[in-house]
Image: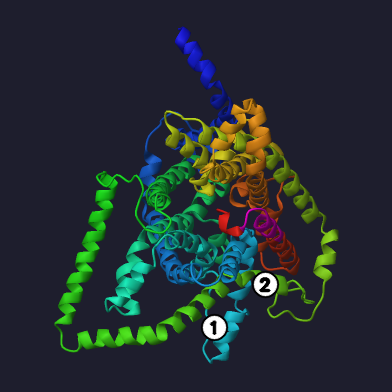
Amino acid sequence: MKSNKKGIKKNWPKYALIAPSTIILLVAFFLPILSLFSLSVYHGIAGSGLIDYSNPNLANFIEFFDPYNIKVMLRTLKMSLEATGIALLVGYPIAIAMTKGSNAKKSLLLGLILTPLVTNVVARTLGLMIIFGNGGPVNSFIKMLGFEGVQFLGEELGIVLGLVQVFTPYMVLSIKAVLENINMNLQEAARDMGCSRFKAFIKVVFPLSMPGVVAGCLFVYLLSFSSYVTPKLMGKGKIMTMSMYVYQQGMSLLNWPFAAAVAIVLLVTSLILVTLYNKMTSRIERMNDRTGNYRNLNYNNAWHRFVSRIGDFFYDIFAAIGRATDNIPGVKSLKKGLSGVFDKGGAIFVKLWTILGVVFIVCPLPIVIISSFTEASMVYFPPKGFSTKWYTGLLEKTEYIKSFLVSIKLAGIAVAVAVVFGTMVAIALSRYKFKFGNALKTFFLSPLMVPAVIFGLAAVRFASKFGWNASFKGLLAIHIIIATTYVIRTVLSSLIGFDVSIEEASRDLGANSWQTFWKVTFPIIRPSIIVAALFSFITSMDETTVSIFMVGGQSITLPVRVFSQLEYGLEPTITAISSLLVLFALIILFVIDRLIGLNKFKI
């Protein structure tokens, strides 16, 4: 008994640090998510919101396998796969370009890639709607060439292109993280052994970059599969996806049990992808700086054996195809010729492709800004005339002013709570040993792993039990969770690798734990805390999907109001507001660069 008391006394600081965030997560995140499982086994009466609790069964899950539902599922999987493939083709050359050349070039490319990521997704999608609209620059160019215009909006093609633009930066950053750790002398050694530039890339660089490629593909696929805002706007509500289906069943048809069942199917699929993604990113984190070897990696575990067998399987297939085709007359010489063409023209092609890829990722933002200075009452590009009336007129749009104030108040309170509680968790996870440390870290970062539409559905249903739906209190709870998660991840990354000998020296000189933290630790990690606060603030300001479920009355955030307006059509006031959101994101990114440098910033 005495030893137990001593153990509790010794360990109470670490439990005290994680207690507030643990309580918030359990009550406002895990309980709502778990309530979906219990809700899914009951029968709901569509259109009424009534639920029959008398006979729990699995009928909702059986109903999910209706041909229409399977069609929606397969369509979502197909579009996500297409978006992931295109994102890889667009993103890989950009990732290579970001690892070569001068520091100025690398910083410029990194800034261009990060800017869309910290910009509101509604503002980015608005730019895409202008670009791919019937009267937009893409269709104008197609018609100028003498072809008929292409219908992008309201079609799967438009949704896929939208997903590619929104999520390609994640692909770029995932691959870049691996490419930076590859010893490029290996490629030069292959060239010295007689390999062409193309063959050296295929045989050396690309295989070594596979952890980043797989991680990027899994991440983009997961985000595309669970996306709501972009498919809704680019598809004009005509193309049903899984996330839209969850919203329709829950919020429009009020069939809560079936919506919960669909959400669980989406959740299970997402968690499988998240597990695979975490496996791959754990390999990336263990890579040495320049050698490409792994530190402390157990090569005998089941996962590594599985990955190795998959890699060997595909390598054997490609090798067999190569040997078989070499025996066909003319094929070997054709390969040699193509290799020579790649060596001569490949570099130019890759540079042009990289430039086009960066333009595609970034161009929706300047398109929105330029379009906002039109004189016309409709959105055109290029704009008709020049006027700033849509900016000066914002002061007369009281509904947008109120929504802006709601967003500011919401983000301000959420960040204030998140910075304190999130930093406490980060310190606890980095300074103390927990019995299930990895599981605890996953617990605190889990809101980032669950699709936003599922969190939104669970939150609005759970909040309704306390009368918090369509209220500021309900919105604040979910924003605190989201902001806290980002603070934990950002501050924790700055504490990993922190030189604890500095703290030990402070304590040796007579400082207690509080004095050591305040005088030594805090000044060192203060830039990261400020960055975490800024990033969580802009994330809260930009949050749309979860907030769509929770808003109502006087608690409508600015992104949700802009999104709602875009569902009815383009209007210049929206372009002016979106332009200001882009400018706000640029300011935040500039401050982050000044504080810690963009190369140390992690999304």
Q: Identify the residue at image location x=64%, y=39%.
A: 480
Query: Where residue 240 appears, x then y in whole percent?
Result: 49, 59
Q: Identify the residue at image location x=68%, y=78%.
A: 381
Tag 2–tag 1 contact (CB < 8 Å): no
Residue 397 visible, this angle = yes
For residue 331, the mark is none
Q: Which residues are magenta?
A: 587-597
Residue sticking out furthest to the top: 1
Quadrant the N terminus occupies: top left
Total numbered badges shown on the rendered structure: 2
Query: Where residue 365 appears, x then y in whole percent?
Result: 65, 69
Determine whether 373 is above or below 543 in the image.
below
| Residue tagged 2 | 366
Q: Is residue 531 magenta?
A: no
Identified by mark 1, the residue type is Gly
Determine crowd level at label 2: few under 14, some 14-19, many 20+ residues with C-alpha closer than 10 A.
Answer: some
- Looking at the image, residue 271 sits to the left or right of residue 325; the answer is right
Determine whether 101 is above or below 291 in the image.
below
Residue 14 location, quadrant? top right
| Residue tagged 1 | 149
Q: Earlier in the sequence, mark 2 or mark 1?
A: 1
Q: Nearer the viewer, residue 510 or 477?
A: 510
Residue 468 visible, this angle = no
Determine whether 450 is above or below 204 in the image.
above
Query: Where residue 312 appears, x then y in whole percent?
Result: 22, 60
Determine crowd level at label 1: few under 14, some 14-19, many 20+ residues with C-alpha closer than 10 A.
Answer: some
Query: Where residue 50 appears, x then y in whole percent?
Result: 54, 37
Residue sticking out furthest to the bottom: 146
Secondary structure under tag 1 reads loop
